[in-house]
Amino acid sequence: MANLILSAAGAQHMMPPAWALLAYLIAGILFILALRGLSSPASSRRGNRAGMIGMLIAVATTMLLKAPVAPGQFLPSPTADDLVTLGQIVAAISVGAIIGLFTARRIAMTDMPQLVAAFHSLVGLAAVLVAAAAFLSPAAFGIVGADGHILPVSRVEMGLGSAIGAITFSGSVIAFLKLAGKMSGAPILLPLRHFINLGTLAAILGLVGYFTQDQAPWVFWTITILAFVIGFLLIIPIGGADMPVVVSMLNSYSGWAAAAMGFTLHNSAMIITGALVGSSGAILSYIMCRAMNRSFISVIAGGFGADASAGGGEAREQRPWKRGSAEDAAFLMQQAESVIIVPGYGMAVAQAQHALREMADMLKKEGVSVKYAIHPVAGRMPGHMNVLLAEANVPYDEVFELEDINAEFAQADVAFIIGANDVVNPAAKTDKSSPIYGMPVFDVDKAKTVFFVKRSMGGVGYAGVDNDVFYMDQTMMLLADAKKMCEEIVKAMAH
Amino acid sequence: MDFISILSIFVLACFVGYYVVWSVTPALHTPLMAVTNAISSVIIVGALVAATTGMASHISAARWLGLIAVVLASINIFGGFAVTERMLAMYKKKDK
């Protein structure tokens, strides 16, 4: 085996030894198992550990391949320079580990979407840096051809890797700023943006093609800079409720960037991971689009919600509605047999999940059946509501997906809507002119009583459409901050 | 490895990814994104290759880029796995 290590260490452009190829393959398989574990909460932690072991194997294998082992020896015989190199790498990993662990421990669960966006940006930037390093020192990556130039196929791979990485980076930075509220979440529409975007994309692809003929530095750097610009331009026109699609899409891009660099390095672990992450993000984007009944193209084109709110506002008429109190809600829910809670992004904003769970606990003590109904696009990223409820100690077997619970509203005594709006709007089923027509929604209108927790009657949902549920006979509006309302209901029930 | 065998791995892995991701329960979609974030930082392999180019005493541009990429990927690896672990620990069954 020592000889195998040597043959690779001596000539880096040669194929890595068999043990290393196998180790990378095992790392790739462990990553597949990491995702596979997420098929149920029970197996999920085992999966996450598999992912950690896979990463350890990938890093250790790479380090071993670089270890300075002299011919005929098994143990490395490092020079002073090698030890400094090792020190630099250990220092770099330690800095990253400290920042990463500190952030992971401190982040609030409501802030997960922006954390994920920030992490995506790092993968993107790392891909750009690795591609640039490969361009500057191609020999180290074993991609120099017989003529002394970088292999043409490797130029395409590093050009695409750098471009996708740069798009991921600048797009994720914008997504982060929007999600963290450091930049307006509203779509920003530039004139001629479709023309500019398509032109820039065509220029990037054209330059990648030209790169195979001429490996001049300006070609590589122009590709990278144009990609940074297009990432920025692609995300600024998208806002609000479309953010889950954006976050999923950037997740996908970060995978494709890793895969492209895997092609450059001929590394199976990177290629397998890239393909996994790329498909994961693509599938999540698809699920999000389907849950809003919008095509992927229309989300990417952006601008949703920018003009709809203006149109919806003037058409609204004054209609009678009933206001309920915390006492009404407490009384009716205590008398009920079954209550279904529909949480939305407003619950997350008000940080009401803990107070809500307390309310549910009181009801369960009285023998009321309590279930939670989660819409796929509730929150600002896929599965966001589930994490928030889990954080508030809501058992996951009380939380149901749209298709599993929708039929139960007809038998439910109370539907308790908190911080959601568009996902319970019956206009999606009946009104063909509505911007949300065709979106799958909860049939809360079939429940015997509906409580609608909302800050005021003024604001309508993200899509800017009025909601008939407000004006139904069986609906009582609970106008208050979501957290305060839950706390008041708990107080009223205690009496 | 030649280009075609790498391409084969990639295409097959896309199919594996497709089926594995569809089997993920929607309740765990946020941890899915966090963990995919962590594993896509396997790009650290490329960063390590770059960070070991040339001489340590005379840091080349490629080595600088590699070292910075190692830091970025490490943030993601440690942060991604740790935050996933933290989230998954919160998912509990009804106690009866």
Image (cartoon, coloured by chain):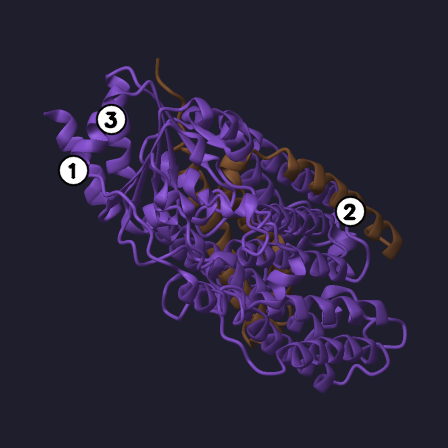
Chain colours: A purple, B brown
N-terminal-most mark, 3 or 2: 2
On the image, the x and y values in percent for residue A92 come to 47, 61
On the image, the x and y values in percent for residue A109 come to 36, 46
Residue marked by disc 1: A488
Mark 1 and mark 3: span between their CA atoms? 14 Å
What secondary structure is marked by label 1?
helix
A325 or A37, nearer to the observer: A325
| Outermost residue to the top | B96
Q: Please, what is the three-letter code of the amino acid marked with disc 3? A: Leu
Position of A33 with respect to A485 (left or right) is right
Q: Are marks 2 and 1 in contact (CB under 8 Å)?
A: no
N-terminal-most mark, 2 or 1: 2
Using the rendered image of the protein, determine whether residue B4 is visible from the camera's viewpoint: yes
Q: Please, what is the three-letter code of the amino acid marked with disc 2? A: Asn
Using the rendered image of the protein, determine whether residue A105 is visible from the camera's viewpoint: no
Residue marked by disc 3: A332
Q: Are marks 3 and 2 in contact (CB under 8 Å)?
A: no
What chain does mark 1 sit on? A
**Point 20% across, 32% down: residue:** A328
Residue A476 image-quadrant placement: top left
Mark 2 and mark 1: span between their CA atoms? 74 Å
Residue marked by disc 2: A3
What chain does mark 3 sit on? A
A361 or A98, nearer to the observer: A361
What chain does mark 2 sit on? A
Q: Which marked residue is nearer to the observer: mark 2 or mark 1?
A: 1
